[in-house]
Each structure stands twice: as C-alpha cells, then as structure tokens.
Image (spheres, grey):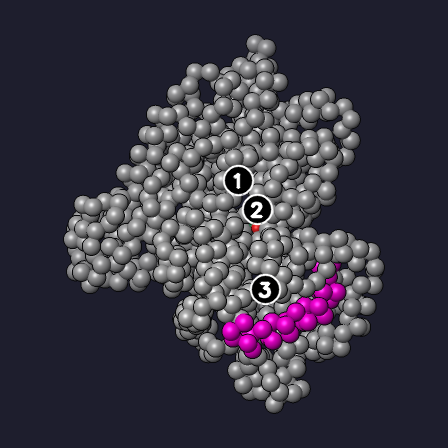
Amino acid sequence: MTNEKEPTLTREGFRDDILHHLKYTVGKDRHHASVYDWRLALSYALRDRIVEPWFASTKATWDNDYKRVYYLSMEYLIGRILEDAAINLGLKGLAAAALLDLGQDFDVIALDEPDAALGNGGLGRLAACYMESMATLGCPGYGYGVRYEHGLFRQRFEMGQQAETPEDWLSQRHPWEFERPESNYTVRFKGHMEERHGKTVWVPGETVIATAYDTPIVGWEGRWSNTLRLWGAKPTTLFDLERFNRGDYAAAAAPETLARTITRVLYPDDTTYAGKELRLKQEYFLTSASIKDILRRYLESHDDITELDKHIAIQMNDTHPALAGPELIRLLVDRHDLPFEQALEISQNVLGYTNHTLLPEALERWSTWLMGSVLPRHMQIIEKIDAAHLKANPARPASIGIVRNHEVHMGELAFVMANRVNGVSALHTELVKSQLFPALDKLHPGRVINVTNGVTPRRWLKLANPGLADLVTETIGEGWEADLDRLEELVPHIEDNGFREAFMAVKRANKAEAAHWMKVKCGIEVDPDAMFDVQVKRIHEYKRQLMNVFETIAQWHEIKKNPEGDFVPRVKIFGGKSAPGYAVAKEIIHLINDVAEVVNNDPDMRGRLKVIYPPNYNVTMAERLIPAADLSEQISTAGKEASGTGNMKLSLNGALSIGTLDGANVEIRERVGAENFFLFGMTAQEVIERRKNVNHAREAIEASQALKDVLQLIAEGRFSPNQRDRYHGLVHRAWNSDYFLVTSDFTDYQRAQAEVDAAFLDPDRWARMAALNTAKMGFFSSDRSIRGYMENIWGARSAL
Ligand code: F58
C-alpha cells in the first residue's frame, strides 16, 4: 500500500520508521514495549511526516512575504492528536497496516493518548477547529496559547456529586511538540514607573521568562501546516544563591515559584469572571510573549515598523488576550519610538476581537488598582487609549468609557482597539450590537460583523464517525472533507430506500458501540434501539440541563402512573462539567445523578427510560457520543447561548435537534427546514418581556399539573430518600425566581418532546429527517468560518 502524497512511503517503510523511533527515540526493545511506547514511536513516525509540509509552509511564507494571521487564545481544547494527524496526512490506513505487521492495533494505540484539554468548552474547542481549518485552507498563521501543566480538571462523581482531580497530560512525554528554548522573552509584572531623560521607563518588580513549545498543525491532505506556539514559564534567575546563603530561602525561591504558578493550571471557570491576580498575569504572560514574538518575526524581514499593519493580523479570542492592544502600543512607543497616536492607529489596524458571550457576569473587568499594580505602564496606556477615543468621539456617553467606576472594561477596550469586532452567530451578532455595545456600535457603524462558528469535518465526521464518512464517500465520491457544501449532493439520495437504510444502519452500529461503552463505563445496560437523547456541554443554568431533568422526571412519573402504556423508549444521556465553584450547577449534576439512580433501578420502567451520565465529558467522549445521538438537546434560554458548536456536530452526525431560537440553532433550523427541527420556547425578545412579570415562575407552574408534580416529587425527596430536603433550595428557586425561565418554557418543551416521540415512531420519516440534517450541514464547516475571517477581518490570502 502506498500513500498518494508520498509514493515512496510503503507499509514496510513506515513499519521501519516506527521501529526506528521505538528503538532510538523511545529507547525500547520491541519485545518489551508497552502500548505507551508504541504510541510514542508511532507518534514520532507520523510527526516526521508533518515536518516536510511544515518546513515548506514556513519557507513559502517567508519567501513570498505572505500576510500572517496570529490567533491569540487562552484556550485550545484539542483532544487527541494522533489519529487526527494520521487522517490529515492520509496515513491512517498505512499506519494501521504497518502496526498490524508488528502485532499492534492502531485503535488500541490511539486510545492510549490523553486528551490535550487546554480549554473549558466551546471557546477552546472553536480555537482548535480554527487552527485545523487555517492549515487546511493554507492561511499562513500561528496560534498562540499557554502551555498549562494541568488542563481542565478530571471529573468524578462521589455519591452523585462532582469531585475534581487535577488533570496531568504532561506527566507523560508529549510527542507532538518541539521545545524551543532559544525563543524566549522576559515578561514583566508590577514595579513602578520612572521618568528618565524624558522617557517613561517601567521598572518591573517581578519577571518571568516565556519559552516556546511548538506543535505543528497539519491540514487536510498535508498540503499546509501552521504552528501552535504554547508558552511555558521559566524563572529568570535559576537560583538566588546570595539570598539562599543569607538564609532567606523563601525569597531565594520566589522567581521559581512565580514561574511555576503562572502556567500551572487552566482556570476552570467558564461562568463568572473572578478578577484574580493570577488570571491577569496569565493573560498578560500570553499576550506579551506573543506580541514580542510577532514583532521579532516581522522585523526579521522588514525594516519599517510602521508598515506592520500591511503584513499581519492579530485575532483576540474573546477579551482574555485584550492586553494585546496596550502591549503593542507600549512596544511601539517605548521600544520603537513611535508617537502614541501612530502606535494606536497601527495597533487598531491589526487587531480583531471575537466576542463569545453576552452574560454580564462573564464579561471581564479589572479593578484599576489591580491593573495599576500588576501592569503600571499598561494602566497608563489604557487611560491614554480611553482619552484618545473620547477626544475623537466627543459625543461618546460616559457610560461606555473603557475606564469607569474604578474598573477597566476589557470588552470596551477590545472593541475600541479592534478594526473588526465579531459575534459568533447571526443572532448573537445582532445582540452584540443592540444589547452589549449599542453606543460603541453607533459610534463605529460597520465595525461589528458576524462570523457564524463552524466545526472541522475532519475530526467531527471523518474521525468520529468513520461509518458515516464512508457512506458519504460511497454516495457522493471523495473530496467532501474539504468542501463540505458538497454534502448537499446527498439530498437526492435521501429518496432512495437503500441509502436511508444504510444511513440508519450506521447510526444503529454507532449506538450499539456506545451502548457497549456505557455498559463498561457506567455499568448500565441500554437498548440500542431506544432513542438516544443527548445533552452534552458545560453545565450551566442558562443551558437548562435542569429543564431536561424535569422532563425526565415527568416522563418517569407518566410511566409510573400508566405502567402498561405505550412509551417510546428513551435513553437520556448527559455529559458535562461544572465550574468547581458554581454551586447551583453542581446541584444540577447531583440531581441528574439522583434521578438516574431512581429511574435506572425502577422495575416499572422496563427499559423504557434510562438516564446515563458518564463522568468526565471531554473531546474524546464527544467523539463517541455524538455519532450515536438521535436527538440533540439545544435548549438554552433564548438570547444566552452565543452560538453553540455541539449543535452543529450533532446535526452533522444525523441527530435531530430539539431547541430554542438561540445562537446558531436559528441558522441550523433555517438550513434543515422548520419541519425538521423541533422548535419550542420563547424568543429572545419574549424572554425579556416575560421577565417583567415578577410572578412568571409561579404562574407557569400553576398552569402545568405535570410540572407541579415534578417539583412536588423532588421536594418530597423521592430522588434523595436519605436526605429528603436536599433540593428544597432548588425547588424554592424554581417557584420564586427562575431567572432562566425553565418553568415558563417547560410546557412547550414537553409538547415538542411529544412531537419527537411521534416522529421516532415512524422510522422512515426519522431516517429522512436525520439524513437531511447531515446533508444540510455544509455551511457549518469551520472552513467556511475561516474563509469569512480571512476575507472580512484579516485580509489574508490562501497560500495554496
Ligand atoms: C462559548 N463560550 C459560548 N466561553 O458559550 C458558545 O455559545 C460558543 O459557541 C463558543 O463559545 C464558541 O464561540 C465559552 O466557551 C468560555 O469557556 C470562557 C472561558 C474563560 C472564562 C469565560 C468563559
């Protein structure tokens, strides 16, 4: 077997590559090698194959002076790398065959890899999809991030409650990265400002060295490869011997302590902005090292710093790297002697800002005191930016200043510093304009634009669902992986019985596999012919897992009241983590597990209802569950979910959605057609109206016997028999506050769920709807999103 790209690479040749690395890189004899050793050897052999396109891409960018795009993100939720790289290189088959010759199984080896979990949820996963799409499209670029020692925590359930343990992906060798100790920058914190010879000088109080670790990101068919550069931290002084000798041991170790803490752990809070000093330091650490690296690279091949904006674009993934503006100005002014106004203009020309949330509690603000003490020079610059903006826009209302009420508002800072601000779905972008930044939008019409999110079809179809990917290829031919609009060509085939049967056979096989996995993982038997009803995402009140549990309880109650009745068998599958300090979300997790315990052990259910909640949802688990889903729960309170990307992955894999008019659901529904989407609930506008009625919850509950019963059952302790008052607080809040309007949308949700049941009872209808979902998802490829960024924000061109 030969690889198309490299006719010289044979099965035997690749086998030798693996053996070579096993012996000389891993240092193991093949007869004593563990799965881990084989995985390393295989990874190095694959990595070798990325190096050629990587070098070629880098060289082409230098030679042609292509515009470079820099993506700055505090999070990259990558997942496993090995299989993805093998698929993009077109080497998966060859690798599997070579391993077979060595008595090894590719799948077993791929499964050994830990997830790279340097992100919380959607925002971090989006960054990973975008890196892959930039490489696929040949967009010359770099991702910059932080090399956290511990990624997102591991979740366990103890007596139904979430417990967190540290994640330690770097405790093993990480074969995909290249350490670059020669690429390092000193990052400063604290200290004070001095005037020296008419110049403002920042005398730092603390310093740390940022040192680069590069991971090549290879695109589809290995045609282009970019770099993901993650910064690790090292102490500036290895060891302060003088202080140590004086007996001042703590002070002697201070630089090391700072270095260790800065990249120690990913902040696991995806809900509220916490205002912690360490977080600000992490954000500046990423930003400062990246901007310095960007300028260094630019000046290696250009003399004129004022031409910077013609050659680069920098994208800020939310406000977390929003210090990029002040940092770039600082370097242009303090190091390159540009006047402030010119530095400001150049910086604005290169920066773009993506907003991912409207939730007020998630918007970053830093007290001027903290900003001034951690970054005194930046605080001065931020004030100058604010003043310059006011001067240029004298009509600007005081309410939108960057610095106000003794706080720096990072959203406003990012908006003012960017030439383009984008929302992540059509609805979200409208709300960014009308609710989040109305005054700034008025001052800068046209600055806010929309780029609807997307997902990479290589990982989320080809890798996660090989059965469906093969069926697609058999039906419409090759090439859809990098041209997802071609899925539309499936539409005429949906009329064909044979195609529908094949489509549902793939789904059935995926469900059987997932059922087996659930048995092993959770010890619970589920019927692959039941409807797999899936809600996988971070646990948050606005995402309304609570409404799903209420509906589960209502269904259980129905079956109890009518044990001989006809019910469509369902497996309710939940997955997701809560921020460790988010008590209400943790209570929801507890309730799901408590309900699961009762439902799964109730003989009256006779398999008609099961609740499964496997712990530690991550990218790898998503790859398993999404292809097995029949129903996709996208049930957030309208106006709260910026976009969602799980919704796209599930539809792409042939799940039907039950959802509100929120985020990208709106666009998914437009594409699959209203008749193929189970819509329910209030619109964003109705949500605002509804809240004006202070009795909304009480009235909604009084109007629904089913909901009243659900709350009564929970309040009685039916799901917490050994602590009957466990959920009194939860029930009380449902009756009295219910900010996210679970109760107001509940009845309509039940109505939509009944429609889901009716559709599922007609397998042929369901098959058509499911296949149509796949066929209509072309738009949601992250390739389309990245093309949008390239054309409308970055002004970048493909090098391919
Ligand atoms: C998510 N945001 C949005 N934030 O909630 C989701 O609708 C959207 O599809 C996705 O971004 C991609 O645009 C999100 O995941 C975080 O996790 C932040 C982490 C850091 C602290 C604040 C939240």
Secondary structure under the numbered disc 1 in the rendered image: helix
Q: Main secondary structure of the magenta part?
A: helix
* Residue closer to the observer: 676 or 723: 676
Q: Quadrant of residue 195?
A: top right
Res. 93 visible in picture: yes
Rendered image: mark on residue 676:
3
What residue lies at 37% left-to-right and 50% top-to-bottom? 479
Point out the stretch of residues depicted in magenta: 739-765
Q: Nearer the viewer, mark 3 or mark 2?
A: 3
Q: Is residue 272 above or below residue 474?
A: above
Residue that badge 2 annotates: 452
Residue 763 lies in magenta, yes or no? yes
Mark 3 neighbour class, 10 Å CA radius: few under 14, some 14 to 19, many 20 or more: many
Q: Is residue 37 left or right of residue 185?
A: left
Measuring from the top left, give residue 186's x and y in whole percent.
45, 28
Nearer-N-terminus badge (1/3): 3
Measuring from the top left, give residue 661's x and y in whole percent.
66, 57
* Residue closer to the observer: 127 or 186: 127
What residue lies at 72% left-to-right and 43% top-to-bottom? 435
Secondary structure under the numbered disc 3 in the rendered image: helix
Q: How much space separates mark 3 and mark 2, taking CA atoms?
A: 21 Å
Residue 494 lies in magenta, yes or no? no
Q: Quadrant of residue 793?
A: top right
Rendered image: mark on residue 788:
1
